[in-house]
Amino acid sequence: MKLLDRYLVRQILWFTLLVLAVLVCLAALFVFIEQQDDVGTGSFGMLDAFAVTLLKLPGQAFQLLPVAALIGALVGLGNLARGSELIVIRAAGVSIARVALAAAGAGCILFAGGALLGEVLAPPLEAYADEVKTFAKFDKYSFAGRAGIWVKDGDRIVSIAQQSSDSSFGGIYVYSVSDGADGHQRLAALAHADSAQLVSGQKWRLKNYADSLLGDEGVATRHLPVFDVESEVSPEFLGIAVVNPGELPIRGLYRYVQHLKANGLETRSWEVALWSRIARSLSTILMCMLAVPFVFGPLRSAGAGSRTVIGIVVGVVYFLINRLLENSGDVYDLNPLLVAWLPAAVLAALTGVAIARAR
């Protein structure tokens, strides 16, 4: 049995890797095409677009792994069925459940590889890709910091602590500098605002604004409910400091959820991202097992093309249901665990029933 298990696992892994390579190449093509709109902006060129595409490949592979696992298992086991090897295995007394267990073993190996991609390689590489693109497009600005963002815009240095939407930021500090009599720059003013929002073009609206002007005669302070300021710094540039739930590893999401809970803040969207990431990773195992009843059932005599189409359809439907529930969770105030695990639970139930009914 161990020999047969290893043989089945090798077949599934080999075809899964082939399918994943094809899917990643197609995804890389789309990512590279997507970068073309920004080529020529600032110093962002074709080489930068190519570098950004390469840096995003591990993340693309992680996202595509469940679909690749299903297609690879369908094609790999389908080839064995067409060569009557599965018939021989069944005649030797191996049950369909045992074949499904071997497929689950291959899924566990793919799950471990996906964890390496999604938890170790992809997050830092995607963050670096965003930095490469942003720095090239906005090369006349300076940037520093990882917990927040520090931007030098002319004679202003801006510190931003957080982002609440695509064009709304919070925890704003603005330091203005000027040339002193000795030729060195000195602090001329310090300002703080609770939030900043891009209202039009290059106009930013700062709310609950307060500043202190440092002059030779002393410090002058003022407080305004709203203060508008012109700046060429765009939300896209500032977005480099935003923590994207989709790019964080599981451990990072978990730590951030605990931080939000400790401070009494809303955690729903982050919990959905956390549990959905875990559920999607574990679905790789289910996808490998789902191929077994198809191969022993309606797709026993079908060609590789038919099995590939079935795999793509099932994978796309599962992906769309996941996205639909994730996006509707906040709207309808759904439980994060329900949103994240319902598609995986349905997939597991269908897989179990299909394997039990297979002959």
Image (cartoon, rainbow, N blue to C red):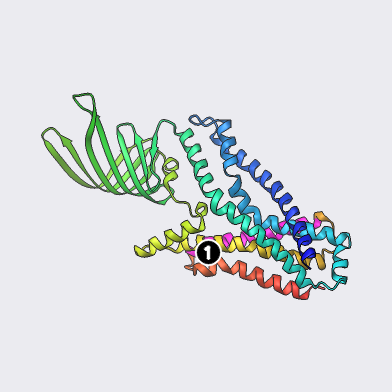
* Residue 158 x %, y %: 32, 40
Give yes or no for residue 317 being in the magenta stretch: yes
* Residue 297 x %, y %: 82, 68
Please give the name of the residue rendered at 53% of the width and 60% of the height, measured from the top-left corner: 327
Nearest the viewer among 327 and 340 is 340
Please give the name of the residue rendered at 50% of the width and 37% of the height, measured from the top-left corner: 132
Disc 1 element: helix
Quadrant assignment for the N terminus: bottom right
In the image, 152: left or right of 68?
left
In the image, 110: left or right of 305?
left
- The quadrant holding residue 238 is top left
Question: Considering only vertical position in the picture, is 331 above or below 48?
Answer: below
Amino acid found under the numbered disc labelled 1: Trp
Please give the name of the residue rendered at 52% of the width and 49% of the height, measured from the top-left corner: 123
In the image, 10: left or right of 281?
right
| Prevailing SS of the magenta stretch | helix
Nearest the viewer among 89 and 334 is 89
Residue corresponding to mark 1: 275
Question: Considering only vertical position in the picture, is 156 above or below 348?
Answer: above
Give yes or no for residue 326 being in the magenta stretch: yes
Q: Which residues are magenta?
A: 306-330
Please give the name of the residue rendered at 34% of the width and 62% of the height, measured from the top-left corner: 263
Q: How many marks?
A: 1
* Residue 16 x %, y %: 72, 54
> In this orientation, does residue 11 appear?
yes
> In this orientation, does residue 316 appear?
no
